[in-house]
Amino acid sequence: MIRDITIGQYYPAKSVLHRLDPRVKLVSTLLYLISLFLFKSIPGYIVATVFLVAVIRLSKVPFSYIVKGLKPIVMLLMITVLFNLFLTRDGEVLFHAWIFTITEGGLRTAVYMAIRLIYLIIGSSLMTFTTTPNELTDGIEKLLHPLNKIRVPVHEVAMMMSIALRFIPILLEETDKIMKAQIARGADLESGNIIQRAKNMIPILVPLFVSAFRRANDLAMAMEARCYRGGEGRTKMKPLKYQSRDRMAYIVVVAYVVAVFFIGRYVPLHLWIF
């Protein structure tokens, strides 16, 4: 399961999405996530699906690699679906047994919420798959640059966010190594109840925290050795500049958001199909 987590990882490829300005990808991802909650009908989900499939094709990231990142959230997804399925009491009753009741509205809400969560994870992952940590830092810093006027340390905030995102796959890899080492020494991490399993995680958490603090200290020493003093007066080797493809990407994303809003809210399914 640890190896299936792909959050924060970069997938190198030569695609249109990889060449886009990181600011475009950050803003577009935010607009896409907002768009998932602007509609509540099948036509809206059809438009969102077509757009997501097109973006995945353009990214040249293997679909199997993207789906692998969904495995860690299966439990959260199931809990969300069950809560919406049994706690929403709108519409006609489809099933009733003891205290469990499934209604038409509950089933519809559960399915819609599951699709939204899956699309949300995939859309967010595509941004990190196609953007290096350095590009992500530069993009966040550039977008938040106006906050410098009110003395917000934008460069430091962007750098911390990028480092935290970059440390996710590193710590996951370290956790996998520690688990394998403990299992090789005879540790039992699978058997027992929840409390016993939590106790069995102690031999993993202690060396993991030690390793995390050691890596953070090494990073701090490396930055000091390179005379890092923050973002004041620093220049960029590759300054961010909008190209024609970036402006076209903005137009496409805005057109998608407008289309999914109006189609998902005001166009009935039978009129949209026929």
Image (cartoon, rainbow, N blue to C red):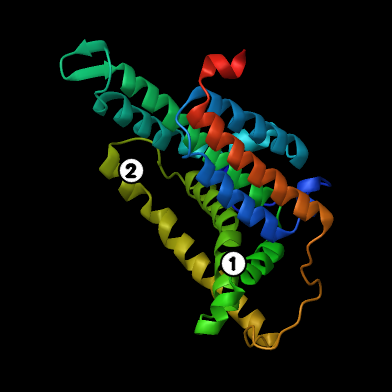
Considering depth in this image, is 202 or 184 the residue closer to the camera?
A: 202
Horizontal relation, residue 26 to residue 132: left or right: left
- Above or below, 205 against 214 in this view is above
Q: Is residue 6 visible?
A: no
- Above or below, 110 against 33 in this view is above
Residue 199, image x, y percentages: 31, 49
Looking at the image, how many numbered discs can be counted on the residues?
2
**Quadrant into which the C terminus falls:** top right
Secondary structure category for the residue under label 1: helix
Residue 106, image x, y percentages: 32, 23
The image quadrant that residue 63 belongs to is top right
Q: Amino acid at mark 1?
A: Ile
Q: Is residue 253 visible?
A: yes
Residue drawn at point x = 53 percent, y = 18 percent: 269
Residue drawn at point x = 53 percent, y = 45 percent: 33
Mark 1, residue position: 163
Residue extending furthest toward the left: 98
Residue drawn at point x = 77 percent, y = 77 percent: 236
Distance from disc 1 to disc 2, alpha carbons, whole Å, reads 31 Å
- Above or below, 250 against 166 in this view is above
Residue 73, image x, y percentages: 47, 38
Considering depth in this image, is 156 or 261 the residue closer to the camera?
A: 261
Question: Which is nearer the N-term, disc 1 or disc 2?
Answer: 1
- Above or below, 77 against 101 in this view is below
Residue drawn at point x = 48 percent, y = 31 percent: 265
